[in-house]
Image: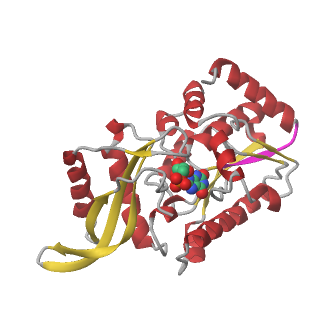
């Protein structure tokens, strides 16, 4: 485990040494990794760091407000409302890898503009140890590792938490006094809710996924999952009132893991599952059924695309 008492001052000093008198940017995702990297870098260079949060419209419920509150103390914080641009770029696209690519590219475009605006020489990233392993192994395209450095000509990249595991990053977050919500927040994929709706990304599916994810996170808190989520996985017949409807199928997933590389589906009691089902179908007229995913990783992945 990381010794936070020595790690934090050392990391801050190292960031200061690397960046010197120059400017830096960091993309805040709402997750704990980039939050910790930003907090450390801000401590090192203050407002010469521009933290950029791009609201892609693919975020969790309340995430943008949470960011605004948590990082309110950073005067240089920029929040970019890019919802419409992301949805437009994704319209009609159904292939999972193509979706990821489009999101990555759009993100780079948004971020590049902000980085130029901030006159940034350095890029700070919240890359953690398992990200590097998965990227090096070609398991998935991580947009917090690839992409950005190639399009924006940074003098250097600073990755203050690159050797830490997720649970160690959480410890550092608590040590830094970051909001408990941020420190404890479950991992969330870069492409956001787009990988929790199978096929085309539409506002309707996103709304269902966003609400269902919120319900699942709330109801399963006591199970302390590594990740608990819900995804819109297709359509099926249901009955609402006196009518047969063709509604969305929502899959609920809750897994335990140390680093996301492997995971075990959690055993959840029936009453809790029923409560989740009734909240999701009760508050979304267009949801016909809710299922629970019992598959470990491998053979499944944690996310749905
Ligand atoms: P999978 O679905 O591959 O996910 O089992 C493993 C862990 O990684 C997260 N994940 C991502 N994180 N960018 C990220 O920063 C991504 O593109 C991405 N895809 C998946 C996922 O939520 C899980 O914690």
Observer-nearest residue: 199 or 242?
A: 199
Residue at the outermost left position: 242
> Would you place residue 236 above or below residue 281 in this image?
below
The residue segment tinted magenta is 21-27
- Determine the residue positioned at 37% across, 47% down: 217
Residue 224 is situated, as x and y percent measured from the top left of the image, at: 39, 37
Q: In this view, does 205 lie to the left or right of 37?
A: left
Q: Can residue 168 be seen in this view?
A: yes
**Residue that lies at the very extreme toward the top in this rendered image:** 5
276 left or right, relative to 91: left
Q: Dividing the picture into quarters, in which one does residue 117 lie?
A: bottom right
Residue at 87% x, 35% y is: 20
Q: Position of residue 136 (x, y in %)?
A: 72, 51
The residue positioned 47% from the left and 61% from the top of the image is 304
Residue 197 sits inside the magenta stretch = no
Give above or below for 178 relative to 62.
Answer: above
Is 25 magenta? The answer is yes
Residue 48 x, y percent position in the rendering: 78, 41
* Residue in the image at 17% along x and 74% along y: 239
Looking at the image, residue 186 sits to the left or right of residue 118; the answer is left
Q: How is the image coloured?
A: secondary structure
* Image coordinates for residue 196, horizontal then vertical, percent: 46, 62
**Residue 188 in view here:** no
The mark total stands at 0
- In the rendered view of the protein, which quadrant contains the N terminus? top right
Task: Name above or below for residue 45 compared with residue 103.
Answer: above
As drawn, the residue found furthest toward the front would be: 299
């Amino acid at each position: 485990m990381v010794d936070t008492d020595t790690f934090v001052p050392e990391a801050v000093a190292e960031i200061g040494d690397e960046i010197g008198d120059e400017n830096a940017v960091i993309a805040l995702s709402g997750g704990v990794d980039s939050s910790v990297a930003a907090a450390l870098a801000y401590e090192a260079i203050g407002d010469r760091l521009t933290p950029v949060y791009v609201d892609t419209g693919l975020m969790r419920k309340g995430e943008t407000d949470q960011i605004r509150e948590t990082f309110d103390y950073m005067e240089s914080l920029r929040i970019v409302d890019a919802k419409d641009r992301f949805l437009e770029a994704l319209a009609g696209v159904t292939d999972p890898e193509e979706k990821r690519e489009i999101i990555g590219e759009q993100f780079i475009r948004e971020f590049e503009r902000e980085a130029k605006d901030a006159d940034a020489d350095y890029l700070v990233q919240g890359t953690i140890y398992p990200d590097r392993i998965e990227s090096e192994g070609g398991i998935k395209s991580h947009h917090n590792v690839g992409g950005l450095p190639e399009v924006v000509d940074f003098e250097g990249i600073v990755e203050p938490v690159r050797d830490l595991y997720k649970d160690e990053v959480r410890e550092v977050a608590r040590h830094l006094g970051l909001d408990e919500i941020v420190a404890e927040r479950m991992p969330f994929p870069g492409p956001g809710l787009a990988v929790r709706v199978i096929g085309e990304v539409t506002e309707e599916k996103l709304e269902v996924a966003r609400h269902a994810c919120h319900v699942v996170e709330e109801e399963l808190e006591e199970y302390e999952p590594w990740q608990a989520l819900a995804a819109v996985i297709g359509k099926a017949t249901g009955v609402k009132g006196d009518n047969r409807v063709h509604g969305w199928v929502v899959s609920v997933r809750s897994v335990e893991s140390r680093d996301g590389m492997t995971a075990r589906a959690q055993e959840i009691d029936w009453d809790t599952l029923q409560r989740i089902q009734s909240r999701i179908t009760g508050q979304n007229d267009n949801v016909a059924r809710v299922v629970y995913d019992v598959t470990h990783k491998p053979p499944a992945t944690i996310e749905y695309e």
